[in-house]
Image (cartoon, coloured by chain):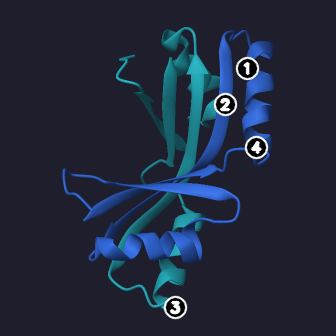
Chain colours: A blue, B cyan
Amino acid sequence: MRARVLIRPKQGILDPQGLAVEQALPALGFDGVSEVHVGRLVELSVRDPSQLEAMCERLLANPLVEDYEIEMLDGSSA
Amino acid sequence: MRARVLIRPKQGILDPQGLAVEQALPALGFDGVSEVHVGRLVELSVRDPSQLEAMCERLLANPLVEDYEIEMLDGSSA
């Protein structure tokens, strides 16, 4: 089954990439942009989706400073 | 409006992070994982969603080696 993991800096944790994007956009002529957050996207095929949470905790995300969200793709549910 | 941009290495472009994850998982006891790709996730609030594609082309993604996909969140459409 195909899964997608969205990994984001936790609320309140510094997000330097998000800040950099937010500051660069007006310089390129793009106005009206706010609350920019940059995270990671992991897409993978798994035989056993029940392992996904453990994979996030142990390798994909850093649970101290990142939140993660698991989405099953192709209509399958976790 | 809240938008999400998913940025992935183009098909056929080397994805060293994906490879590293794919090789690390079995070592941690997670089997049956394949086709791992690691990309970036950008979430932002925009006043004018029609600018998102230009933002991707000019700053968020590297169109030479990355594909991007724009999703509007909170039920709004691009």
Of marks 4 and 1, which one's residue comes earlier in the chain? 4
| Location of residue B66 with respect to A40 vertically, above or below | above
**Kind of residue at disc 4:** Asp
Q: Label 2, on which residue?
A: A36
Q: Does the residue at mark 2 contact the one at mark 4 (Cβ under 8 Å)?
A: no
Residue B59 visible in the shown view:
no
Instruction: Specify few, some or many for label 2: CA neighbours under 10 Å numbering under 14, 14-19, or 20 or more.
Output: many
| Distance in Å between CA atoms under marks 2 and 1 | 10 Å
Left or right, residue B64 beside residue A32 = left
Residue B68: image location, x then y, percent = 48, 36
**Kind of residue at disc 2:** Val
Of marks 2 and 4, which one's residue comes earlier in the chain? 4
Residue shown at the point (80%, 24%) measured from the top left: A23
Of marks 2 and 1, which one's residue comes earlier in the chain? 1
Q: In which quarter of the view is residue A5 placed? A: bottom left
Q: Label 1, on which residue?
A: A25
Between residue A12 and residue A34, name the one nearer to us: A12
State the SS at label 1: helix
Q: Does the residue at mark 2 contact the one at mark 1 (Cβ under 8 Å)?
A: yes
Q: In which quarter of the view is residue A63 placed? A: bottom right
Residue A38: image location, x then y, percent = 65, 41
Q: Label 4, on which residue?
A: A15
**Kind of residue at disc 3:** Ala
Q: Are marks 4 and 1 on the same chain?
A: yes
Residue B27 shows which numbered tag?
Answer: 3
Instruction: Specify few, some or many for label 4: CA neighbours under 10 Å numbering under 14, 14-19, or 20 or more.
Output: some
Residue B13: image location, x then y, percent = 51, 55
Subunit of mark 4?
A
